[in-house]
């Protein structure tokens, strides 16, 4: 759902989100850098942070260490980075579900997605995939919809937390088929996936990094990709349009943000390095193998995009009546 028409929205209002330039006398980095992830290990954000962190460690000569901070639906991690020193040594690996979804879910946030951060770079985007436990007697999205209608309120779906994109996607699907389903929130995609494999959860709509390996080894079954085209790493999985649900699309993105006030020349140096990494064939291959796509944006582009995404997800969340539990 990264659309060109949405990138331009609020561009004038968001242009000031980039941190003001200040002299940066020291070399960067001269010590280890923390990449804070608002999710438990095993999900798409964790995958992105570790893939990017490893590449940055090799290219810049200092360790980029992933720090998983779970809690508050992503707010704990965001607040930690917002309050960190604006020196480039604490970064946020933002997941779209929390970064542009939480402002519509939590009326009194102690951080602001625009004013609290300096956008650095978009790193990758990920369609979602509808997956079910292997014991569920359905082989397609149409069969799942029919099963849900014949068993109203009996199917449960997992998410990595109330108000996340997985939660929104589950509610979208339930509304589209006209059958209620039970939402079961978890503290991250990893624990949710464990229960899906164990069979205590019926289905989940999540990003491919968490499920590609499990689909391949038969632990779970993939029914549809929530994007306009099939993914090369899941070539036998139809799109939602091919499965008869053309209006059901869901895409996440992951980007790097620094605390507001981080020197602009430091932000630009880091962003340029991320761009170089996202253009590397090996990085792109690793992304594609996991079911995601490298998708770079520079600080100015990411600032405008953040603003347009805030408008889009706020409208969707309010229309669906999604609330943080």
Image: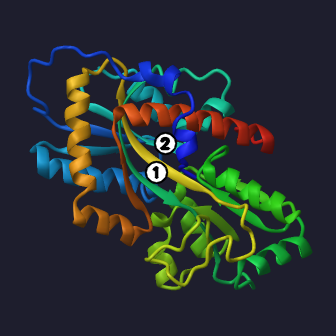
- Which one is nearer the viewer's eye here, 42 or 141? 141
N-terminal of the pair, mark 2 or mark 1, is: 1
Above or below residue 171? Residue 139 is below
Look at the numbered disc 1 and give the secondary structure of its residue: loop
* Quarter assignment of residue 117: top left
**Residue 57 x/y as whole percent:** 16, 48
From the viewer's perspective, tell me whether residue 263 is left or right of residue 253. Answer: left
**Residue 246 x/y as whole percent:** 72, 66
Q: Which residue is located at x 26 percent, y 23 percent?
A: 264
Residue 120 appears anywhere in the view: yes
Q: Which residue is mark 1?
A: 40
Residue 74 appears anywhere in the view: no
Above or below residue 166? Residue 8 is above
**Residue 271 x/y as whole percent:** 26, 38
- Which one is nearer the viewer's eye here, 188 or 211? 211
From the viewer's perspective, tell me whether residue 15 is left or right of residue 317. Answer: left
Question: Where is the C terminus found, in terms of image quarters?
Answer: top right
**Residue 13 x/y as whole percent:** 52, 20
Q: Which residue is located at x 34 percent, y 50 percent?
A: 49
Contact check, label 2 and label 1, Cβ < 8 Å: yes
Q: Which residue is mark 2?
A: 70
- Which one is nearer the viewer's eye here, 184 or 233? 233
Q: Which residue is located at x 12 percent, y 42 percent?
A: 62
Q: CA distance from mark 2 to mark 1?
A: 6 Å
The dot on residue 265 is none
* Quarter assignment of residue 257: top left
- Neighbour tally class for label 1: few under 14, some 14-19, many 20 plus, Cα within 10 Å: many
Instruction: Report the coloring of the rendering.
Output: rainbow
* Quarter assignment of residue 54: bottom left
Q: Which residue is located at x 82 percent, y 61 percent?
A: 176
């Amino acid at each position: 759902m990264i659309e060109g028409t949405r990138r331009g929205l609020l561009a004038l209002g968001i242009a000031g989100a980039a941190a003001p330039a200040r002299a940066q006398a020291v070399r960067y980095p001269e010590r280890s850098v923390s990449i804070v992830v608002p999710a438990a290990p095993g999900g798409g954000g964790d995958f992105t942070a570790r893939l990017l962190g490893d590449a940055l460690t090799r290219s810049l000569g200092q360790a980029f260490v992933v720090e998983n901070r779970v809690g508050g639906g992503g707010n704990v991690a965001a607040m930690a980075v917002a309050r960190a020193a604006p020196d480039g040594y604490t970064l946020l690996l933002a997941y779209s579900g929390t970064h542009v979804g939480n402002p519509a879910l939590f009326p009194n946030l102690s951080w602001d997605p625009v004013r609290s951060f300096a956008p650095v770079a978009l790193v990758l985007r990920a369609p979602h995939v509808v997956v079910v436990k292997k014991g569920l007697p359905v082989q397609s999205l149409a069969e799942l919809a029919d099963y849900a209608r014949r068993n109203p309120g009996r199917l449960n779906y997992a998410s990595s937390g109330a108000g996340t994109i997985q939660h929104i996607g589950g509610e979208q699907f339930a509304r589209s088929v006209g059958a209620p389903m039970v939402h079961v929130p978890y503290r991250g995609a990893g624990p949710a996936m464990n229960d899906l494999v164990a069979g205590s959860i019926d289905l989940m709509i999540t990003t491919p990094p968490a499920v590609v390996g499990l689909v391949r080894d038969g632990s779970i079954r993939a029914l549809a990709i929530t994007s306009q085209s099939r993914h090369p790493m899941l070539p036998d999985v139809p799109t939602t349009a091919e499965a008869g649900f053309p209006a059901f699309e869901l895409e996440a993105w992951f980007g790097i943000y620094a605390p507001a006030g981080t020197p602009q020349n430091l932000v630009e140096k880091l962003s340029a390095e991320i761009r170089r990494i996202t253009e590397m064939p090996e990085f792109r291959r690793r992304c594609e193998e996991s079911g995601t796509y490298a998708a770079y944006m520079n600080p100015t582009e990411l600032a405008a995009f953040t603003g347009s995404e805030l408008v889009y997800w706020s409208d969707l969340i309010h229309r669906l009546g999604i609330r943080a539990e």
